Amino acid sequence: MCTLSVAPRPARQNGRVTSPVRDYDAIVIGAGHNGLVCAAYLARGGMRTLLLEARASVGGTAASEPFGGGTVNICNCDHITFRTTPIAEELRLADHGLRYLDLEPSQMNMTWAGGPAWASHHSLEATLDSIGRSYPGQVDAYRRYANAAIPAVKLVMAAAVDPPSLGGLTRKVLAARGRGVTTLLRWSRRSAADVMRSYFTEEALLGPGLLVGPMVWGISPETPGSGLGALTYAMRHVGTVGRPVGGSGEVPRTLLAAFEAAGGTLRTAAKVAAIDCEGQAVRGVALDDGTEITAGVVVSACNPHDTFLHWLKAPPPQAKDLVRRWQAIPHDDGYESKIDAILTAVPHLRPVVEAGHDGDLGTTYAIAPTVADMDRGSQMMASGGVLERPGLLANVPTVADPSLADPGRHVLSLEALFTPYAHPGGWASSPEPARWLELFGSLAEPGFAGTVADWRAMTPDRYEREFHLPHGHATSFAGGPLAALRNKNPELTRYETDVKGLYLTGAATFPGAGVWGASGRNAATVVLRRGA
């Protein structure tokens, strides 16, 4: 618990005023995984750090929670990018119990347009072999794609683990001998759909890659400048897809353990009402219960709109342009939903079994609309409509990790895209979620409906209500390291703002969304360099 503090109190030494005595050196707002990462590094760096979380538990949408006799993940639980960072090793998360199960294959790919399913593997050759069994005409195309994309992914991953700078990126480019730069430059100017069409002719190769790229980002694959969304297949050849034993929530749980082991303090059910300033600098925060907490550093791991437009009070003159810019930036609506179902048996998908695979959904199955339907679905969001056959990401995590459910039970995770926040009539009474479950069942072997013991739908309105995401959407940084260097909102890539002592981290800042954690680590690096 924190004591009420009206203002920083001047300390005196030999009669001279020294730096003010503050409640903490740093306050981090929001205990999602980036907030946890940032707070853990600050505490490990010697700063007296307070982590504030509005919910009763930490982790945000990276968390897991009990449902129907199982453990369900708030969002899909395939971790790639987090495992390409040094965070787990540096914070010694294994000492706190974090263990991963590697997934092979790393993804199963299929489309509503029909045709055999094919498997993505960490091994390029194994992937080519799977493609060759059903789509032999696409093997050479995939090899050309991989030759262009893999060096670019390696460069993106290397750039993500440091605050972006021209000098830093130049050193990484030189270390890579320039490989990947041409791809990043060329692809970033094109749409992801155009990039993929320059290699593939089959919807079975086009659709799944664009589903887990631009569609997961909430945009049409035809969007100009979305070309780096075509890197998604190659990411699986660079990083290793895995899931934490016990569910996605093991990452925030062990991050919290590392934070507290370093001396950090967590306060839950603590809603921030204001970020207070004094002179040119941040002064601390005020909670909605009236408590004031002082610190020389405040890091917001929440969305910038709340940070700058709702919480920031009496900003100094140099921050006026910052506030004006964010007043002019629209906040997007949420577009993703998730069904969690408790099953009495593992389903098997017919198109996957017919292609010679197990079909047991141990890995994630990307069930993609056509490229034309993805584009049409993005346009339908303006009126709240949902595609007849939306994009689905399906898996049964209990196949690989039986600890996630009671004996004789299995957990089905089914994400659906696009599912707009502004759905006509609202999501509470919508028949859509039940339709997605039935649609998924139409791909399964007979009897699937009889195995569903319980289910729930997490729709954008619930993400807003239960996870404090305005309109069910978390603002995310778009683009790669090149976009970071020329970003018109520099606080999203520098992590520091025009208010001295006020910093940002989270999905809105470089390198972006997903369970990555690099933003939290980078923000902490900047704070520790600047000092309290």
Image (cartoon, rainbow, N blue to C red):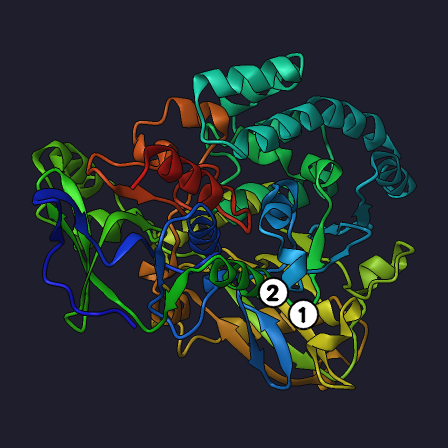
Marks 2 and 1 close (CB-CB < 8 Å):
yes
Residue displayed at 48% across by 58% down:
259
User: In the picture, residue 96 is in which quadrant?
Assistant: bottom right
Q: How many numbered marks are there?
A: 2
Q: Position of residue 126 (x, y in %)?
A: 88, 40
73 relative position to 469: left or right: right
- Quarter of the picture holding the C terminus: top left
As rendered, which of 256 and 425 lies closer to the eye?
A: 256
Mark 2: amino acid: Glu
Mark 1: amino acid: Gly
Residue displayed at 58% across by 51% down:
91
Find residue 246 and name its label: 1
- Quarter of the picture holding the N terminus: bottom left
3 relative position to 188: left or right: left
Mark 2 secondary-structure assignment: helix
> What is the distance, in whole Å, between disc 2 and disc 1 at their CAs?
6 Å
- The residue wearing badge 2 is 250
As rendered, which of 30 and 364 lies closer to the eye?
A: 30
Disc 1 crowd, CA 10 A, few/some/many (<14, 14-19, 20+): many
Mark 1 secondary-structure assignment: loop
Disc 2 crowd, CA 10 A, few/some/many (<14, 14-19, 20+): many
Could you tell me if residue 370 is visible in this image? no
